[in-house]
Amino acid sequence: MSIHLSKRAALDLDEIDQYSISKWGKNVADDYMQSIDFALQTLKENPSLLRSNTAFSTVFSLYRVREHYFVCSLHNQNIVVLTVKSGNLDLPSRLFELEPTLIKEAEFLYSQLFKK
């Protein structure tokens, strides 16, 4: 199993890091980002931890990491983290808005990953 981050997810993680540094300081931000790195490794080793929830999305799977959710797409032996969203948001509404774009992003990433 492999795990990949979309550009959007990488930007989300950078925003989370910058926000955490400004709000709570570098040590807390580093600890939080280590939690996220650990979660990515955990998902890579245990993809069955991803959860589908039709209240959130009929297309994507979710994984909660402390105060955030990874929104993921699965394809064969690959997990793509498409975005990372705060658990404080109205996640069902936000995913409904993002879903068409995220589907296109997932399709593009898969086409890039599996070029022959």
Image (cartoon, grey):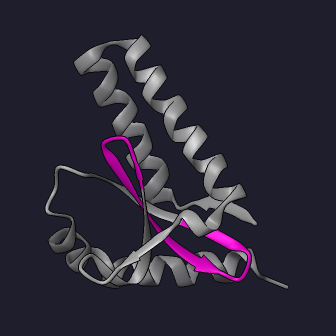
Magenta segment includes 77? yes
Residue shown at 55%/63% (left/top)? 49
Give the side of residue 93 with respect to residue 43, left or right.
left
Please tell me which residue is depicted at 59% across the width and 49% down the height of the picture: 40
In the depicted view, which residue is nearer to us: 16 or 72?
Answer: 72
Q: Quadrant of residue 99?
A: bottom left
In the rendered image, residue 91, in percent from the top left (x then y), is placed at 21, 65
Camera-nearest residue between 85 and 110 = 85
In the rendering, at what x and y percent does residue 2 appear? 73, 63
Residue 115's place in the image compared with 95, above or below, is below
**Above or below for 64 versus 78:** above
Q: Position of residue 71 (x, y in %)?
A: 41, 65
Is residue 116 one of those drawn in magenta?
no
The C terminus, quarter of image: bottom right
Q: Is residue 77 left or right of residue 66?
A: right
Q: Which residues are magenta?
A: 64-80
Compared with 9, 32 (above or below) is above
In this rendering, position of residue 111 left or right of residue 96 = right
- Give coordinates of residue 73: x percent, y percent: 52, 75
Q: Residue 70 lies in what quarter of the image?
A: bottom left
- Image quarter for residue 52? bottom left
Q: Nearer the viewer, residue 36 or 15?
A: 36
